[in-house]
Amino acid sequence: MEPVPARPTHATLLVTDAVYDPRAKQGSVAILVHHEDGGRSEAALILTPADLERLHAQTGRMLGDHERSRGGAP
């Protein structure tokens, strides 16, 4: 029997630059995957242009929510 790997719980960004590969037409962001057993593993989050646009819109909205929560301009 093979051991069952611990399930991932979440991922966080590693402190590296994101990279866009024009030949592959995709972006890549280094992430750290956290597992239920406390283990961690490095991985790459691969993003298509559509993924990049969606992520840009979503993070922009989150930043706006963050600013408003701190009493900043809407």
Image: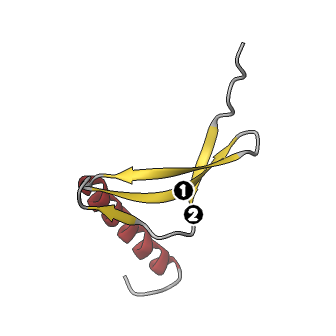
Could you tell me which quadrant the C terminus lies in?
bottom left
User: Viewer-proximal residue, 32 or 57?
Assistant: 32
> Which residue type carries mark 2?
Leu
Mark number, residue 74 = none
> Which residue appears at 64% of the width and 34% of the height?
7
Count of numbered circles on the image:
2
Q: Quarter of the image holding residue 32?
A: bottom right
The secondary element bearing badge 1 is classed as strand
The secondary element bearing badge 2 is classed as loop
- Looking at the picture, how far across and down is residue 49, in whole percent? 25, 57
Q: Is residue 4 left or right of residue 10?
A: right
Q: Is residue 71 left or right of residue 48?
A: right
Q: Is residue 8 left or right of residue 16?
A: right
Q: Residue furthest top?
A: 1
> Which residue appears at 36% of the width and 71% of the height?
60
Q: Is residue 36 above or below residue 56?
A: above
Q: Quarter of the image holding residue 23?
A: bottom left
- Looking at the picture, how far across and down is residue 45, in whole percent? 44, 52
Crowding near the residue tagged with mark 1, few <14, some 14–19, many ≥20 C-alpha atoms within 10 Å: some
> Which residue appears at 30% of the width and 54% of the height?
51
> Which residue appears at 45% of the width and 87% of the height?
72
> Which residue type carries mark 1?
Ile
- Evaluate if marks 2 and 1 touch, with contact meaning CB atoms under 8 Å apart: yes
Residue assigned mark 1: 31
- Looking at the picture, how far across and down is residue 35, in whole percent? 68, 42
Sequence-wise first label, 2 or 1: 2
Q: Residue furthest right?
A: 37
Q: CA distance from mark 2 to mark 1?
A: 5 Å
Mark number, residue 14 = 2
Could you tell me which quadrant the N terminus lies in?
top right
